[in-house]
Image (tube, helix red, strand yellow):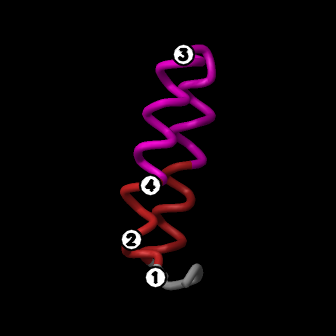
C-alpha cells in the first residue's frame, strides 16, 4: 500500500481527533502537516 492511499486516511483521523479533542487542534494540525511534507518529499514511502 503506497502513501498516496494513506493521505486521506491521515486526514480522516486528524478530522476525527479535532472533533473529539478540540484543544489539541494545534498539535494535530502540526503533526498532519509534518507527515504530509515528509510524504511529499518522498522521505516516507
SS of the residue at dot 4?
Answer: helix
Q: Where is residue 35 in the image (x, y as percent from the top left)?
A: 55, 61
From mark 2 to mark 1, how far is it between C-alphas? 6 Å
How many other residues sit within 10 Å of disc 3, few (<14), some (14-19) or many (≥20)? few
Q: Are marks 4 and 2 in contact (CB under 8 Å)?
A: yes
**Is most of the magenta stretch helix, strand or loop?**
helix
SS of the residue at dot 1?
Answer: loop
Q: Position of residue 39 (x, y in %)?
A: 49, 74
Residue 21 higher or lower than 36, as above or below: above
- Judging by the rendered image, the residue that carries numbered circle 3 is 22
Residue at left offset 38%, top offset 71%: 5
Residue 32: image tag: none
Q: Are marks 2 and 1 in contact (CB under 8 Å)?
A: yes
**Magenta extent:** 10-31
From mark 4 to mark 2, how far is it between C-alphas? 7 Å
- Judging by the rendered image, the residue that carries numbered circle 2 is 5
Q: Which of marks 4 and 1 is nearer the N terminus?
A: 1
Q: Are marks 2 and 3 in contact (CB under 8 Å)?
A: no
Q: Where is residue 17 in the image (x, y as percent from the top left)?
A: 55, 29
- Judging by the rendered image, the residue that carries numbered circle 1 is 2
Q: Which of marks 2 and 3 is in front?
A: 2
- Judging by the rendered image, the residue that carries numbered circle 4 is 9
SS of the residue at dot 2?
Answer: helix
Q: Where is residue 12 in the image (x, y as percent from the top left)?
A: 42, 43
Q: Which of marks 3 and 1 is nearer the N terminus?
A: 1
Q: Are marks 4 and 1 in contact (CB under 8 Å)?
A: no
From mark 3 to mark 4, how far is it between C-alphas? 19 Å
From mark 3 to mark 1, how far is it between C-alphas? 30 Å
From mark 4 to mark 1, how far is it between C-alphas? 12 Å
Q: Which of marks 3 and 1 is in front?
A: 1
Amino acid at each position: 500500500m503506497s502513501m498516496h492511499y494513506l493521505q486521506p486516511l491521515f486526514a480522516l483521523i486528524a478530522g476525527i481527533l479535532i472533533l473529539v479533542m478540540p484543544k489539541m487542534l494545534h498539535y494535530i494540525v502540526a503533526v498532519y502537516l509534518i507527515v504530509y511534507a515528509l510524504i511529499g518529499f518522498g522521505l516516507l514511502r
